[in-house]
Image: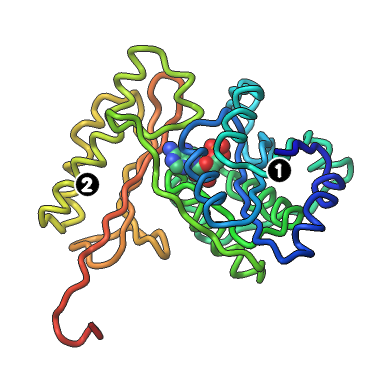
Amino acid sequence: MRVVRTIADLRALLRPLKGEGKRIGFVPTMGFLHEGHGALIRQSAARCDATVVSIFVNPTQFGPSEDLANYPRDLERDQNLCLEAGTTVLFLPEVAEIYPTGFQTHIEPGRLADPLCGRFRPGHFRGVATVVAKLFNMVQPDLAFFGQKDFQQTVVIRRMARDLNMPVDLVVVPTVREADGLALSSRNAYLGEDARRRALCLSQGLLAAKAAFDEGELDAARLLAIARGPLAGVDSLQYLELVDTQNLEALQGPVDRSAALCVAAYVGATRLIDNVLLVPAVSDAPGNGS
Ligand code: AMP
């Protein structure tokens, strides 16, 4: 595994690989890596000839009152995880490398950035889209790997790549969870013992709704009510929504197309998000082409 800190060094390493027609996979991260990131890197290593992982805590996606300054870091552990998971190149840029003096051009995502997290984190997806577009230009990957955990991010980035004709395919990797269901997150490091216990409310609500859906409950309002039950244990619920996976619009009535049940909540001072996909079985009724 090679470790590089500048765009010039990154390009110098990747140029010969691209010249040989190697397939490049890319996993953008903010570090403090866990097995969720590990799953992305392993998938890339399995499907690509070379895997680039970036660790960059992107200031433009944090709001003024968010946890940028305290975002957890452990570079030594991150390097070991990257190496063990099959990383070829680890890119560790400084902020000035990504945003040099005079930087002023941003990606403005459209409506997909407005609901869900966009409502509570103004400017967040503008920052995410901008840094991901820049990283895509630096790495020029064939495949880029993102976690289902950040569902709205995958939708916004896929739209951006299509709208701006970026020659990259997105691969979305299922959320990796602890044995008790808690979605792995770098921010779980903030949770004390009591908060860790109460953080389970998120996945308990979502997984209960998913179980009901799998057993035939299709009504959006009833599924939301099932998920809301356990969420009484959080300190403040930002949103619990069941949305169409394509346009992120709230679903009403029966879940008759792919939907995501998404939650964001504070447990103590820690903001956590999670989601599950609810995908209706393909109907064999005549007239739908099957
Ligand atoms: P982050 O470092 O939090 O910006 O995350 C980097 C990438 O890892 C994003 O694509 C996340 O969606 C993904 N990721 C984070 N947590 C998980 C998880 N528990 N399972 C799968 N992917 C994850």
* Residue annotated with mark 1: 89
Q: Residue at x 38, y 32 (%)?
A: 265
Q: Residue at x 87, y 47 (%)?
A: 8
Q: Position of residue 126 (x, y in %)?
A: 63, 50
Relative vertical location of residue 145 with respect to residue 2 in this rendering, above or below:
below
Front position in the image: 142 or 282: 142
| Residue 108 - label | none
Residue 40 visible in this rendered orientation of the protein: yes
Q: Residue at x 30, y 21 (%)?
A: 198
Q: Residue at x 22, y 71 (%)?
A: 282
* Disc 2 from disc 1: Cα separation: 43 Å
Q: Secondary structure at mark 1?
A: strand
Q: Look at discs 2 and 1 and give the one toward the viewer.
A: 1
| Residue 224 - label | 2
Amino acid at circle 2: Leu
Q: Is residue 121 left or right of residue 226?
A: right
Q: Is residue 222 left or right of residue 102?
A: left
